[in-house]
Image (cartoon, rainbow, N blue to C red):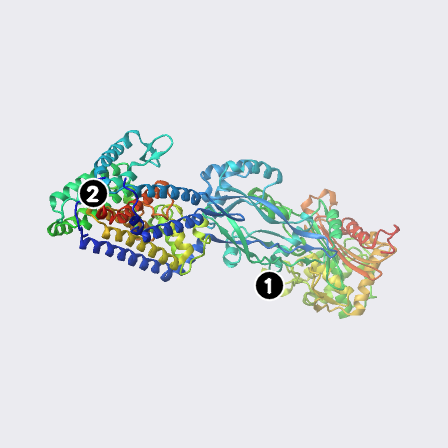
Amino acid sequence: MSPIDRRILTHMNWGLIAMTLLLFGVGVANLYSASGFRVDDGIAVSSFYSKQLLWGAVGMGGMLAVMLFDYRHLKSLAWPVFIVTVLLLVAVPLFGVTVYGAKRWLSFGFFNLQPSELAKISTLIIAARLLSRGGEPLDWGELFKILGICLIPAALIVTQPDLGTTLNVLLNVGGVILYRGIARHVFKTCIIALPPLIPLGWFVLHDYQKQRILTFLDPGRDPLGAGYHIIQSQIAIGSGQIWGKGFLGGTQSQLRFLPEKHTDFAVAVFGEEWGFIGNMILLGLFCLFLLAIFNSARDAKDRFGSFLCAGVFFYFFWQILINMGMVVGLMPVVGIPLPFISYGGSATIVNFCLIGLVLNVSMRRFVFKAS
Amino acid sequence: MKVQLDSEGFQPPRSGLMLLQGLVALIFLVFALRFWYLQIHKGEDYARLASDNRLRQEQMYAPRGLLRDRYGMLLAENRPAYGLGLVREDCHDIPSTLAQISQWTGIDLTEITQRYERDKRKVKSFEPLILVPDISFELLAAVEANINRWPGLEIIVRPRRYYPSGPELAHLLGYVSEADEKQLQQRPELALGDTVGKQGLELVLEDRLRGQKGLRQMEVDVVGRDLTHHILRAPQAGENINLTIDLALQHKAFEMLEGQSGCIVVLDPDTGQLHALVTAPAFDNNAFARGLTGKEWAELRDNPRHPMQNRVIQSVYPPASIWKLLMAGLVLEDKVVDPKETVFCNGRYPMGNRVFRCWKKWGHGHTDLHKALVESCDVYFYDVADKIGIDRIAEFAKASGFGELTGIDLPHERSGLVPSREWKRKRFGEVWHRGETLNISIGQGFTLVTPLQIARFIGALLNGGKLLKPQILVDEKPLVQHEIPIGADARKVILKAMVDTVDAPRGTARRLRRPDAVIGGKTGTAQVVRIVGEERRKKEEMEYWERDHAWMAAWGQKDDKRYVIVVMVEHGGGGSSTAGPIVKGLFDYLFGVPGEAGADSQ
């Protein structure tokens, strides 16, 4: 491990750190309100916010750890990590524990590991490594090779079943591929060939997943069942109007009309309490956060680093798009949390670690020239 | 550490960078627009939906006004009633819950199921549907102990009308019961399960007693627990109203009628205020407020003695000898004959091929008007009536307040009947016979009066000839309807004759005599069965239903207190022997028992 160069600090992506901490702060404050519920003479708050703080602390530790070693070592670690991930994914249906009808966890006694979370990271790294070879736009051969490799974990995850994570893995890889650039004729073919394939996807979906899509298209068809989440979440956000109902003032969440309010629908609580103004600020924070990652991708010293940052960019981008899209009723209900805003232990730790990866890339921009 | 550099002077792909920037711009634009749409464009709609989610409005019951007697004794009050309600949303197994209710209460399961089916559309699924409005205290304990095993079942506490004296005032007060379909439609302020006055004063005074319901807003959470209350409109209690009734007197009168069918009116002749209005047999109006079972209702309806009937105003009887007071007025006013002129009564009065009889088999001998009243001679009135004729009698009776409603504030009053030539032609298509006029003169035949009409007429004799509206409410002023066509001199003669009926050795109401007060009276025995044979049968031999009705109309004055008392005992036989003791007992109450301490000072 090379000694810490002073330039590491000067080239640190301080903007990204600031945005991350701001978002995390907003998230914890919002959780405090979101996990509260009205009791006879006041508000009782569950301990989600304090646990989230704990996860955040662990995550920041992870972030620092990720920053310590040179990210280029990941290049050689990409394959071993990927193979371990696939093995763990294979182990899930054999030894996994079933929670809520889905087998996603491996029990290690003191903690439960979710290999699909690991898969998000390892596919990012393997994709960055595979894509960093050669400089020309991707042709069919390369494209299929990369897609083929990434489809292995995706196929394993979709059977768990966990459509949200599968989509996330595939979309991340797809995003980085587009960032890297593909050959013009490949692009054209895809544009023409893909849309007719979408209806075929319908037959892959489980009944409950089809139900969600139908419900999304028409929430009124089951207002107390599947459509309930969508309707109540829009009522929560809409009733916030311009200025919101104030911190701890959201009736939809305090009176528990809003389900999943501390996890997937946390941003609905925020929208109800802080209104349009608050939402615009939060949206602005997210955009600045994405742009900070974008800066790292742009300024990276090598392909691998740039693609890693782009991967992280897409990792967050898709989650923001899908989660917020679901909460505001623009997308079907898919169990994807909003980074730093939704409660969740492993997600928070992974989020911080990935930020650490981006910071790692950005702060080592000039290190190698000097050595 | 050796680090391999794969591309010195790496330039990131331009299109890729543009893609990332474009995506950031896109995400901002899409969500900014969507937030604007949800929170600003549609914000008010969603705010209203959020309020609908959490705010529920609930009506608050207003206590119904209390009824008191003239001395402030409670006649009708409100008590908490414990009912069983079912919240459909929370109930998993409705049929077995209904069966359990039936088992607890003993009410037929079909009755409960019918009620459930009838009302389930009118009550929201999260509101309790009341299945049994009132359960006893003992049952309440049993139900409360087990209610957790029956989700959706709730004990509902609501005010219920309670009448402390029950049957004694049932006809006067009437009762309340749950509003029926028609009332619910007509009066939008009523909700299912609300009670309204259905009979008697509860019905007449409904608007004053009802009060105004309050409205309470509750904030509820998603499972419907109410967290905060906020009163939007406080309930306004109904008006408390005092009646002219003297509860103790009413009680006394009711006791004395017990076991008989009949009625009693006690009236203040100078104000028209009713101090007692008793009818028997009676029913318990509390049973109606509680909710009558089908069986209870059938028993009341089919009882041949008609316990639901308020006999004071809804039953009509032949006035019998009481009518002679009116006839005397007519004789005196029209001067048909000199009151001193006598008619010889030998107990018989032949007319055509019929013989009309006096009640006294061997006759009264020489009889003038005064004696005819005191000893109630029929033949005297046969004789004068034949001279007067039916047309004049009918006209005079109507002018004296018969055949018309007294205007009392109670529903379903009957006006009785004053027959006339024209009436008979219309009713039967027959001409009037002279002999019928004779029957009319002694209060038999077609003439029908209510006991209240008699009391009002006696009151007019006492108060200077004014027919007053019989009043039940203390706060109403005396209301003169019209005057009787009997002048002061004639009234004096009639009242003197009534006093002598009590005082004179041969008077028919001698048992009313008391040394400390002036008492006047007139007895009457209304024939129920036309007398065909020569002899009247002995009372005991007659079947109950063929026995005569017993009348007594009396008044008394002690110091500045005056009362009119009219008693009618159905199938009671002779007026004096059956109705007399009742009148005497009431004067004993009103004026004190003669000779006892306090009797004079009262």
Specify whether residue B165 is in view.
yes
Residue B412 shows in this picture: no
Q: Mark 1 sits on what residue?
A: B425
Q: CA distance from mark 1 to mark 2?
A: 116 Å
What's the amino acid at mark 1?
Arg
Dividing the image into 4 quarters, which one contains the N terminus of chain B? top left
**Crowd band around label 2 with a 10 angstrom C-alpha radius: few (<14), some (14–19), many (20+):** many
Q: Quadrant of the C terminus of chain B?
A: bottom right
Query: x, y percentage for residue A179?
Result: 20, 50
Report whether B435 appears left or right of A34: right
Q: In the displayed structure, does residue A30 sit left or right of residue A121? A: right
The residue shown at (43%, 45%) is A49
Of residue A259 and residue B531, the one placed in the foreground of this image is: A259
Query: At numbered mark 1, what does the secondary structure look like: helix, strand or loop?
Result: helix
Q: Which residue is nearer to you in this view: A97 or A215?
A: A97
Tell me the residue that label 2 is attached to: A127
Q: Amino acid at mark 2?
A: Ala
- What residue appears at the point 64 percent right and 65 percent down from the top-left corner? B421
* Chain under callout 1: B
Q: Quadrant of residue B564?
A: bottom right
Give residue A352's position: percent from left, percent from top: 33, 45
